[in-house]
Amino acid sequence: MKKIGIFLGIDPYAGGMFQYAQSLLHALEKLPRSDYDIEVAYIGKEWECILSTLPFNSKRIPAGNAGLLIANILMALSFPLVVERFLSKLLNPISYHLNKQYCNLWIFPSQDVIGYQFYASTLNTIHDLMHRYEPHFPEVVRGGRFRMREKRFKSIAKTSTAILVDSEIGKQHVVESYNTPISKVFPLPYIPCINTEAKISDREFFYKYKLPKKFFFYPAQFWKHKNHEGLLRAAASVMNIIPDLHIVFTGAKNYEYETIVLLTKELGMTNSVTFCGYVPDTEIPHFYKRARSLVMPTFFGPTNIPPLEAMKNCCAIGISGIYGTPNQLQDAALYFDPKSIFSIAQALLKLWTDDELVDLLKNNASKVLANLNQKEFAKRLREILEQIT
C-alpha cells in the first residue's frame, strides 16, 4: 500500500488555489483504499468542515503558521538550497510533522515554499510563471517578489519528484524556464470547484445584494493584472449605446481597490458599478446564474478557474484570448484582447445585446465541461500517481 500525504497550507482567501486543493482532496478520495492510504496535514481551521466529510487521517499542525513564516524567512535569506533544506528540517515544525508521517509522496497544491525545502518525494504545483511572462505588473516584481518567485519556482523545478501544471502551455513554460525534464511535468487541468453549490435561498440572496436584473459579473481580487481598469474604460466607452450597462465586482477590498473606486467616479459610472466585497464561495453561484455574462479581462494565465465556474452555472463568458485560455474553453467563450479597450468594448456590446450569441456560448459549454469534471480529474491524478510512486 502506498501512503500519500497532502499538505494544506492555504485558506479560503487564496481563491483558485483553495478550490484546486479541494479538487485534489476529492480526487484522492476516489483512489482505491486497498492501494492507497491518504494522510492530510493542514493549518487553518477552515479545512475542518471540509475534511470531516472525507475518509482521511487528518491532523492540524498547531505551529503551522510559524512554520510558514520560517519557510519564507529561509527563502528570503538566500542560503544555498542544500543549507536552506537542512535548516528547514532542523527548525521548521511543518517539516518535523510531515517527516513523522513516513509518506511515500507528499502533494503540495499551492506552490508552498515548504514543498521544496522538505526532504522527501514531492508532487509540487506550479500554477503559473507570470512573473516571467508578464513581468511589468507590480504584484509579481515589487519588493523583491520577482526574485522570491524565481527562487521558489526554480527550486521546486529542481527538487520535485514531479510537478503539476494547469495546461500544456503551463508545461511548456516550466520546461523552457528551468530546463526541467519534460517527463517530470504533468498537466492536470482545472475543473469547477466541487463545493460551490448555492447555500442561501434566492430570496436571501436578493435582499442581501440587491443587484440589477441585468449585469456583467467579474469575481476577482483587485490586482492590477486583473485589469479592472481596462474593463471600466471599455464599459464607459459604450455607455452612450447601452446606458443601462451594469458591472458587479466581487473580491476583498484591498490591493488596487481604492484606485478602481476612484476611477469609477472619474468615469461617471458610480451608479453603473456594484462592489460586493469578499463573497463566500457558496454564494458565488447565485451571481453566475443571474449575470448576463462573466467578463474577465485578465492578463494572467495560462488558464483560470472562474470561467469553469461560469460554465457550470450556465453563464456566458467573455474573456482574454491569451495563453492556454482558448484551448481550455474552446468555443464556449467570446475572446478579446485585454490590451485593447476597443476589443473589450466590442465584446461587451455583443454580449449585452446579442441573445443568440449568449445562448450559443451557454450551449457550447456543456461539451467543454464533459472533459473538465471531478471524475476526469480524479482519473488523471491517479494516472500521474501511478507513474511517479
Image (cartoon, rainbow, N blue to C red):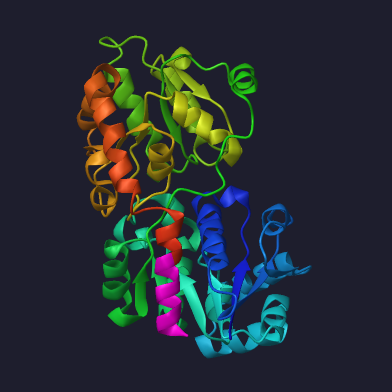
Residue 232 falls in which quadrant of the image?
top left
The magenta stretch is 379-389
Residue 381 belongs to magenta span: yes
Left or right placement of residue 143 versus residue 164 in this view: right
Residue at the farthest right position: 62
Q: Residue at x 35, y 50 (%)?
A: 300
**Image quarter (top left, top right, bottom left or bottom right) of the N terminus:** bottom right
Left or right placement of residue 3 versus residue 133 in this view: right
Q: Residue at x 44, y 69 (%)?
A: 381
On the question of residue 37 being in view, the answer is yes
Examine the residues drawn in magenta and state their main secondary structure. helix
Q: Is residue 160 above or below residue 361?
A: below
Is residue 173 or residue 97 the one in the foreground?
97
Left or right placement of residue 84 versus residue 177 in this view: right
Residue 371, position in %: x, y? 33, 54
Count the marks: how many?
Answer: 0
Residue 105, position in %: x, y? 55, 82
Residue 331 falls in which quadrant of the image?
top left
